[in-house]
Image: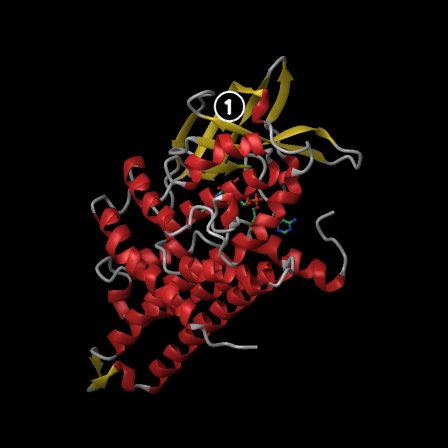
Amino acid sequence: MNFELSTEQKLLRESAKSMVERDIQPVMDEHDQNTPLPKEAMLRIYEVLARQGLMAPRLPEEDGGGGFKMLDYGLMFEMLPPEIALSLLGQECTIARIFAESTKEQQDRFLPDLIAGRKICCTGTTEPDVGSNPREVKTRVQEDGDSLVINGSKIWITNANICDIMNVTCNDGIDENGRGRLRRVVVERDVSPFESGEIKCLGIRQGHLGEAHFNNCRVPLENSLGVSGDAAKVLTLTWNGNRPLVGLTAVGLAQKAFDAALEYAGIRKQFGKLLGGHQLIQANLADIETLIVTSRLLCYSALDAMDNGQRANGTSAMAKRYATTACEKAISEAMQIHGAMGIGCETGLEKLYRDVRMLPIPDGANNILAMIQGRELVNIDAFR
Ligand SMILES: Cc1cc2nc3c(=O)[nH]c(=O)nc-3n(C[C@H](O)[C@H](O)[C@H](O)COP(=O)(O)OP(=O)(O)OC[C@H]3O[C@@H](n4cnc5c(N)ncnc54)[C@H](O)[C@@H]3O)c2cc1C
């Protein structure tokens, strides 16, 4: 066991940090902090990410991917602003899902533009009445000659309003166990138009969280992925990877708050001495650092487990649940060290607090993650 990052890993992290400072943050700064970035700005950022192989980090290099280890990808991911991190996750895990479920002909048709960052994609599973249990998806797909016809609505979908392609999780009847059979259909917006809109949220406001409506949307039959019924398995595998990555986004936000609190404790004086000289403030800082370090290590260890061939269902669920909760607490504590300055908009801490609050929900809300971990512990499925 080695807790020290290798020289290559340190370099990866540094290069991601400079990429953000040089090529990503300036594009974001050109636009309003509280409004989703225009698609044109996102495409400029995607071009930057694509150059680093980040559009398809989980795909082997021989298939056009970045060929990253999950841990190395995570080290870079942690450096990304949350708006870009979530959008990238929507894009790259959709690419991984399409790759896993498609024929060579479909891969050649859909993937090159997505991997180059010329087109934006997403996965639409959640619906107004269906959240934590995707098996209950109601969006219907029916075959009609050489077309598929889709009817239904999706909500809370990352990239929905700016996507060129949505990988839509549809209901295709009932399987032999009486559970919903899922089928994935690639909807190309220029061929099969659908309506969409942004949803205003508490945080990550330059990002894109939206809804989409399919009303007799006709899609070529050859856009159907996989064998009907495989979709749930592919969803789960990619979720396991996503969870520690979302945890690392929380870590990145909390680290920023901690750095600010440490600096403030070194300049602000009360009772005749620096805040940092008061024992209780030192204890507060020690608590915050502990929350961040434990979160980071859990996420790294889940990603490392996947690199070593484990499925890591429980570990990745634990990492995300712990990290998003601990980092929310860490940011709140860092705000407290700033007193009233912490809740004002000037320090940027309130944005970190709003942003981190978005993260315990996607890719498995916290109760769901606890039950995934619990299922491994007691070997009883509490979901059924
Ligand atoms: C930032 C963000 C990005 C997202 N991106 C996408 C995306 O790209 N694609 C997509 O398809 N979806 C996306 N989502 C949606 C997300 O996957 C769902 O919001 C999530 O699965 C939870 O569903 P829900 O909101 O409907 O909550 P519900 O399922 O209604 O759950 C509500 C609450 O009840 C709890 N709960 C549910 N079932 C149980 C149970 N059996 N026992 C105990 N507690 C339970 C949950 O933990 C939750 O706290 C995103 C959401 C967010 C916030």
The residue under the point 71% across, 58% down is 375
The residue under the point 23% across, 44% down is 32
Residue 233 seen from this side: yes
Residue 58 pos. (x, y %): 52, 51
Give the camera-side residue of 99 and 217.
Answer: 99
Badge 1 amino acid: Phe
Question: What residue does disc 1 label?
Answer: 214
Residue 340, located in which quarter of the rendered image? bottom left
Give the camera-side residue of 244 and 257.
Answer: 244
Residue 202 seen from this side: no
What quarter of the picture does the N terminus occupy? bottom right
Q: For numbered disc 1, what is the local secondary structure?
A: strand
Give the camera-side residue of 164 and 261.
Answer: 164
Mark 1 lies within 8 Å of ligand 1 (Cβ measured): no
> Where 156 falls versus 349 (above or below)?
above
> Where 299 falls versus 140 (above or below)?
below
Q: Is residue 165 left or right of residue 147?
A: left
Give the camera-side residue of 161 and 303.
Answer: 303
Residue 322 pos. (x, y %): 53, 64
How many numbered callouts?
1
> Where 87 falls versus 213 (above or below)?
below
Classed neighbour count for the residue bearing mark 1: other residues with Cα under 10 Å, few (<14), some (14–19), many (≥20)? many
Residue 92 pos. (x, y %): 47, 45
Residue reaching furthest to the right? 176
Residue 254, located in which quarter of the rendered image? bottom left
